[in-house]
Amino acid sequence: CEQKFAIEPQDQTAIVGSRVTLPCRVVGKVGRLQWTKDDFGLGEHRQLQGYDRYRMIGSDDEGDYSLEIYPVILEDDAQYQCQVGPGPAGEPAARSRFAQLTVYTPPEPPRIVQGERLLTTEDREIELECVSLAGKPAAEITWIDGFGNVINDNIEYLAESLPDGRRFNARSILKLTPKKEHHNTTFTCQAQNQAERTYRSAKLTLEVKYAPKVTVSVVGGSTRLMEGVDVRLQCTADANPPNVTYRWYINDKLVDTDATTELHLVNVTRAQHDSIVKCEVQNAVGKSEESETLDISYGPRFRKKPESIPADQGSTVTLTCDVDGNPQPDIAWLHEATDRVVGASANLSLVVNQETSGRYYCKASVMGFPEIGAEATVYMKGPPSIISHRTQFGIPGDNVRVECTAYAVPPAIKVLWSFQGEDITTNTNPDYSVLEDPLSEGIKSTLIIRESRQDHFGVYNCTVVNSYGSDVLEITVKPQRPLRLLTVIVSFFCFLFILIAIYFVVVCLNNFYVHVIKLFGKDESLELKTPHLNWELYFFQDGQNNNGYVPYVDYSRDYNPPPPPVTSAPNNNCGGGGGGGGGGVGVDPRYSAVYGNPYLRGGSGPNLPP
């Protein structure tokens, strides 16, 4: 006997809370029967254990195994199938068609975002937003004006899916330019979907400010005013009788002026933006008024500048650029390291790593006004990185300064000096003293060797420690021999002689060309071209000579080390100077303690000019 379906389930729709029955009747059933929901078996017994709202109704005698669901919920929205397994004698299994159960749920009552009443001004566009939440399908929204007319124009409709992927929030935005006739009229928002037969509604009463038969305008025709200009406002009235009196108000305060049809405002400022200027006209019958809101354009100004942030690698930080301006300023965030725009809103969020750390510039602009900008730095916390030179020089007998500059975020806890394996303690060793200068992104420690002797020269260790680790650099301090005075004098006079010789060559060439012009006569046209000599090149070109005596001068102002990098360099502590000041750090090659050391740290640094 063949197992077959007499009745198969069909696609159905249901509303949340209702009862639904999916029919299934089998003829010649000998195998086991079960229902599946999205291909998941629900069980073989009529009382489906674990599914309190599901049960198979009917009788075995009639072969009726219909699935009843009550009450229906959103999770019941699925595909269902009635299945019969093979019989004991090898009868083939049978499966019904798939039946799609679509569950509808009515939306929440609609709500107008602006409330029940809205105060507005005539001829200034407003937006009314009606929201109907959590419907399936999304609610249909209809707007009706105060005269019972359905509004079809200037409406924007949006449907947003909820996280459950089944329900939707519906939004309808009505753009409206209020007129005098809209005053005290009620706008109605109606919402409905397939789960609900009747509309639900929300109402808003519009209060329109207007001045009958009176108009106020800005002389010149432009409603957008630039900050700092003088503004003239004109009030015109069609009155009968024509004998009228005028009063002007700014933000409901009477202006003490003799103005009649015109009001003159001198040097308007951003503080007057959105001020309401009102003209009140009165005659024997009554009074009416009209107002104009000042729309003053002004340039960007920081409410609060962005601030630098130190943070751990992998953490998320937010830079804020709070700018006021009208129109709303355009904001751009630029990352100095990549020289590209990375954000266009007031808040810039980023995950801190080697690529994202660094200096950021916030630029704000309003068309017609100067751009403003501010910067902030995202520091990635890590061990210190020493960026000083490995070789420094001093003159025996003088006070020698050995400098150790380190980038350190968070700040350094301590700086230790040692010489030939022994720690330098300034309290017990009168030959040394230490100066420490905190920097914005690190520290500079200067070891001063008083009245240096030959045995003071050699290899010094500088160790910088913060809460994330340490960095060590070996600094070799070498003696420097003085330059002979005679060499300096001879070089100066040779240079002076070359300049004088060039001058005489130019004079002779000039006289020669003048003689040629006279020789050929006035009718001949000769162009006199003399070589252009850049005298500043000869007088001011820099030279470099480190092989000799340089008088001791405090060059700390001119030879301060360049700003350290804003990202933590790898901490390669390898004994004799594997500090963080290695390759990749841009250092002014002229900087070497106080004496203009021409050498950089190590061989891995950048190529330097001779």
Image (spheres, rainbow, N blue to C red):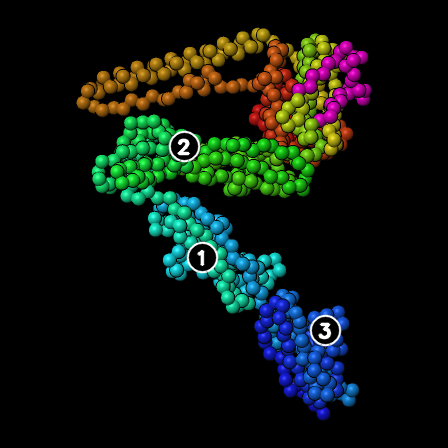
Secondary structure, mark 2, is helix
At a point 42% along the width and 17% down the height, the residue shown is 535
Secondary structure, mark 1, is strand
Q: Nearer the viewer, residue 466 or 73?
A: 73
* Residue holding disc 3: 42
* Mark closer to the chain start, 3 or 1: 3
* Residue holding disc 2: 272
At a point 62% along the width and 34% down the height, the residue shown is 309
Is 452 situated left or right of 299 in this image?
A: right
Q: Where residue 566 appears, x then y in whole percent?
A: 62, 33
426 in the magenta segment: yes
The answer to which image quadrant residue 407 occupies is top right
* Mark closer to the chain start, 2 or 1: 1
Give the distance between the C-alpha atoms of the residues marked 3 and 1, in whole angstroms: 47 Å
Give the distance between the C-alpha atoms of the residues marked 2 and 1, in whole angstroms: 36 Å
Q: Where residue 157 appears, x then y in whole percent?
A: 47, 58
Mark 3 vs mark 1, foreground winner is: 1
Name the outermost residue toward the front.
284
Q: Which of 276 and 435 is in front in this view?
A: 276
Mark 2 and 1 residues: CB-CB less than 8 Å, in contact? Answer: no
432 in the magenta segment: yes
* Mark closer to the chain start, 2 or 3: 3
Mark 3 and 1 residues: CB-CB less than 8 Å, in contact? Answer: no
